[in-house]
Amino acid sequence: MRRDMNRIIARSLLGVPMVLSLALGGCSAVSGVTDSLFGRETDPKPGQAGYVSGFLGGTVADEPRAALLGREVLAAGGSAGDAAVAMGFALSVTLPSRAGLGGGGVCIAYGADTSTSNGGVPQSVSFAPLAPPGGNAGGDRPAGLPMMARGLFLLHARYGALPFGSLVERAETLAHFGVPASRAFVKDLALVAGPLLADQGSRMVFSRGGTPLTEGQALVQPELAGTLAQLRLQGVGDLYQGALAGRLVSASVRAGGPLSIDQLRGALPGLAAPIIVPYRNDSVAFTNAPTDGGVAAAAAFSALVSNPSDVGAAAARSLAAAARFRAVGGDGASVAVARDLPPADLPSLPASTTFGAFDRNGNAVMCAATMGNLFGTGRVLQGLGFLASASPAALPAPLLSVGLAWDPRAHAFHAAAGGSGQSGAAIAAASGLMNALNSGRPMSVPVPEPGRANVMVCSSLLPGRASSCAAATDPREAGLAANGD
């Protein structure tokens, strides 16, 4: 009799698994996952939601969904490098006006673990869009070589912990199912909607019946999702010397090319020692050549160290340093501290965007990305779903300005800042970082116009008092900082 009754109870339980699992799931701890009807919990694995409980670190980006996705990666046990990689790919989906597979960028990255080859001292990671060697016919809008995928792969190889494919997959999901068009994206779209939507591929992605997307409308990109899936399955190299590369070469003819397989194969990102400026107990690192945004930001920061109240002089010095470097090249650190820089202006510069992350272990990354122009060439590569970037041979390069401060004696992260806003990018990064170091708060003072800044700071250093850490995005824009637990 008891055996028969047990069978009846078992059958009745099988009839209501959803109700019970929902009820029990609401009682589970953040660090556990319910795996049975009776509430038994197993520990989440790295890469799964809830793997990290308590303090996660923080993320910041000019587009909110990317910042939230980066925070999800931290919650799944990812490092700051993992979060930055995921955010870079996510911005290719959510803010394609300023970031994309066709474009590129720079990062300053810090690994806190001094037992590793890249721990204890930041590195400059450069993967800005390149002009094709030998040029291209390109017509009125020559395309640059795509660098984003290879650059993020290099960043992950040095600073990642989770599988690279899992980070790509998150952006792939966003592209496949769509995201609500954000305020940041729609603002960019409104500026160039006329010429942009003249391209059939761009019109299909960024409009509804020829009318530009409005805030909240679904931005769905199935072709981009397919390209991201191919990168996830076949690896990044496929875009530079595999099947995707062949498709890119064919599609580039109509999007600012032609590009060649040889040009793609030779398009490599780089690692370099950063430009370092001492400040009190900290060392402050800025990205080094071949890009000059870090040179300009280091020059501005050096000027602020000498005279913190003269922001105008620091801004002028940043432009003078960038102009000198663009004219004669040389050692970026030497240019940043040169005393004989004559006043100089730069031509109208392209748009950029910044994003960053720090994790609970004290690792940190701050990046700047660009398409070489707002929406790049404005032409979507047919069958691949992403915009070609504008060649730096056709338009002035943007100031990709990011910096990071750490205490070398404590082996601890202190602060980081990224600047955008065309000619104001370098002073934005420098002043945002200086203000954070002095006040212990990420955006205590707005950076000078036309600059914008994203800032992260741990006033008591990290590792250390996690409660002293915060990130903030520029209040004049529509980004997001995802902080804390």
Image (cartoon, rainbow, N blue to C red):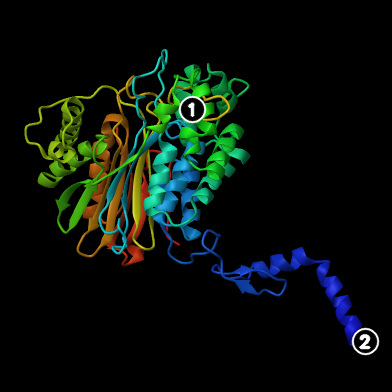
**Residue 97 image point, x, y percent:** 45, 30
**Residue 44 image point, x, y percent:** 56, 66
In the picture as drawn, the residue positioned furthest to the left comes out as: 340
Tell whether 193 sits left or right of 463.
right
Helix, strand or loop under label 1: loop
**Residue 454 image point, x, y percent:** 34, 45
Q: Residue at x 52, y 64 (%)?
A: 51
**Disc 2 marks which residue?**
1
**Disc 1 marks which residue?**
387
The residue type indicated by label 1 comes to: Leu
Q: Residue at x 50, y 44 (%)?
A: 65
The residue type indicated by label 2 comes to: Met
Residue 257, picture quadrant: top left
Q: Which numbered dot is residue 76?
A: none
**Residue 378 image point, x, y percent:** 47, 22
Label whose residue precedes the other's in the sequence (2 or 1): 2
